Amino acid sequence: MSKGRFGIHGGQYIPETLMNAVNDLETAYNFYKNDEQFNQELTALFNEYTGRPSLLYYAEKMTKDLGGAKIYLKREDLNHTGSHKINNALGQALLAKKMGKTRLIAETGAGQHGVATATIAALMGMECEVFMGAVDCERQALNVYRMELLGAKVHPVTSGTKTLKDAVNETFREWVSRIDDTHYVLGSVMGPHPFPTIVRDFQSVISKEIKAQILEKEGRLPDVVLACVGGGSNAIGAFYHFIEDKDVRLIGCEAAGLGVDNPKNAATMANGRLGIFHGMKSYFCQDEFGQIAPVYSISAGLDYPGIGPEHANLKDTSRAEYVPVTDEEAVNAFEYLSRTEGIIPAIESSHAIAHALKIAPEMSKDKIIVINVSGRGDKDVAAIARYRGVNIND
Amino acid sequence: MTKLSKAFENKKAFIAFITAGDPDLETTEKLIYEMVENGVDLIEIGIPFSDPIAEGTVIQEADIRALANGTTTEKIFDLVEKIRPNVAIPLVFMTYCNVVFGYGTEKFMQKCQQIGIDGLIIPDVPYEEKEELHPYTKKYGIELVSLVAPTSHDRITSIAKDAEGFLYIVSSLGVTGVRSEIKTDIGEIVSLAKSASDIPCAVGFGISTPEQAAAMSKTADGVIVGSAIVRIIAKYGRDSVKYVGEYVKSLADACHHQ
């Protein structure tokens, strides 16, 4: 079996044109991940530029209101650029720079990964082009302007469903066309090896911090870690250092759109089956002939028909659980956290909060839940207003 | 002599690609007969995929048209089964890995053998992942075509050594589609490949004029044209048959007169 496997999942299912590029990337990564200077530079940027470590905040009002388990929020929304995406963008950009690349390209769904990549490109003096589904450009117009402000060129993608999956297609097409000076900053734990491993490693800082912070605050590990999953980068980041701690339940919350039984959903674990797409073997929403399904979620960041291969394996081995959360539940949770804690979460992260609203009241008061608040919700305010029938003229 | 290398026997081969079901399967049937009539040596029948990442816009749009009118893998199998007795040249399927995997890899190959498909081209399965398909292509006598690209360098000899049918040389960086100029040193790739294997080498991606076809078939054993044909089909739809015939003849002649 080929490289980069998580159980049966993963691999490198990409055109021959890209093979030497991913092999070079793997060689460079294997060198730099153990390079002291690289790690010092990365840590310095994490701490001085993005504001790590992010806070682990005890949500006291929410805890009391729900009347069950104690709830902590991992505040990735407080990172510079407003989400966990910066962790990976920073790591990959630094790696690309060491490899002599001068140009970064990226796909983006909600725009958070695009903004993070554009930000780091500005910081490091690199060229940046971002591919974003035309539908997403519209529902996340603020982020399009942010990227342009940061000096990036944004390409609206008009093929297929005009969302994240099509943005990934188009970024691969761009990479095949220009490889020498260009690094593809893949935004999630997906795609061909070594991306799922590289992205996971850069995001695993989240669970590393949670572990240290919860031990300091509570003197023990949490009972549950909750995170939303699209491709799965914030979730794997939040899960990774707990995988060996078998008593910690790991729960990924996927986007069920209008419901898992309604065609308009993006619940890959609930509805997908094994497939090979976007460079990896994993679970995908698809029809009987292997055509990729046009998925839907209110959340542009979770509106993706697949999931990273490591998650697929965590599901196969029952180490993690994956639950569907509908648009309506996520919007309610978005509003709930805003009112209860004064924290406006990203609509993506709101899927994880929604599941906490379901399970926390059923758990006893001595239990602990950590929710990864992967991003902040400013970008979503206009869309949520529209969802509620309010026209705020963004 | 393998089934696909028959196309290269005593001549330079002209290989044509069309997307099955674009604009509909009845036209695909007519197009196949017309192309054979006009000197094509091998046909790549594209099974449309929702997300063809190696294709430029011309073939992407053909895939969308085909899928939108209800074309499925099953219906394409039926079409090939129907036309096979009337077509003597080798036929291969070109599609993406999930189309094969989603159908069931073994079932897919079994079906290919049954209907008379000779080979398979899957651009998103590189050398390292060949084992995903090869045990099944081998079992059912389907030749699995390997691709090399301008970026392949040190990989060319090992890929060529294990290649079956013919070696598909991707002429340029990027996706499929018409190019005014091909800058890659195809001769160098061919000679590297030939140092490892006597497999025929065919060049594709970006070729659209008889002049390009003639030039390429001087260095390589064959020429593959896809997007330029699909573009004619996009323009004339059901009436494209005679235009495709004329166009294909000009390319086949350019290759055969080398």
Image (spheres, coloured by chain):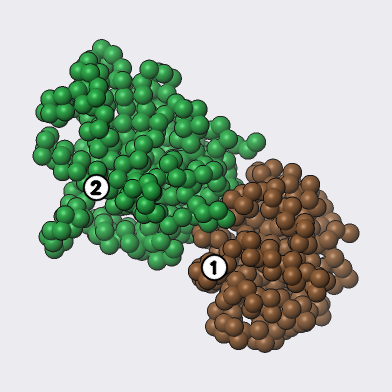
Chain colours: A green, B brown
Say which residue label 2 marks: A328
Q: Residue at x 74, y 70 (%)?
A: B82
Residue A80 image-quadrant placement: top left
Left or right: residue B229 versus residue A150 is right
Could you tell me if residue A353 is visible in this image?
yes
Left or right: residue A331 versus residue B76 is left
Residue A163 location (% of width, % of height)? 38, 57
* Alpha carbon distance from label 1 to label 2: 33 Å
Residue A52 location (% of width, % of height)? 26, 31
Instruction: Give the number of the disc on residue A17.
Output: none
Residue B254 location (% of width, % of height)? 76, 80
Q: Residue at x 22, y 22 (%)?
A: A69
Residue B162 location (% of width, % of height)? 77, 48
For label 1, the crowd category at 10 Å Cα-Cα, with few meaning under 14, some 14 to 19 and many 20 or more, is few
Chain name for mark 2: A
User: Which of the two residues, A386 or B215, is positioned nearer the viewer here?
Assistant: A386
Q: Residue at x 34, y 45 (%)?
A: A255
Q: Residue at x 44, y 26 (%)?
A: A319
Could you tell me if residue A373 is visible in this image?
no
Amino acid under label 1? Gly
Q: Secondary structure at mark 2?
A: helix
User: The N terminus of chain A lies in which quarter of the figure?
Assistant: top right
Say which residue label 1 marks: B70
Residue B40 image-quadrant placement: bottom right
Amino acid under label 2? Glu
Left or right: residue B137 versus residue A342 is right
Q: Is residue B240 above or below residue A373?
A: below
Q: Secondary structure at mark 1?
A: loop
Q: Residue furthest front?
A: A261
Chain name for mark 1: B
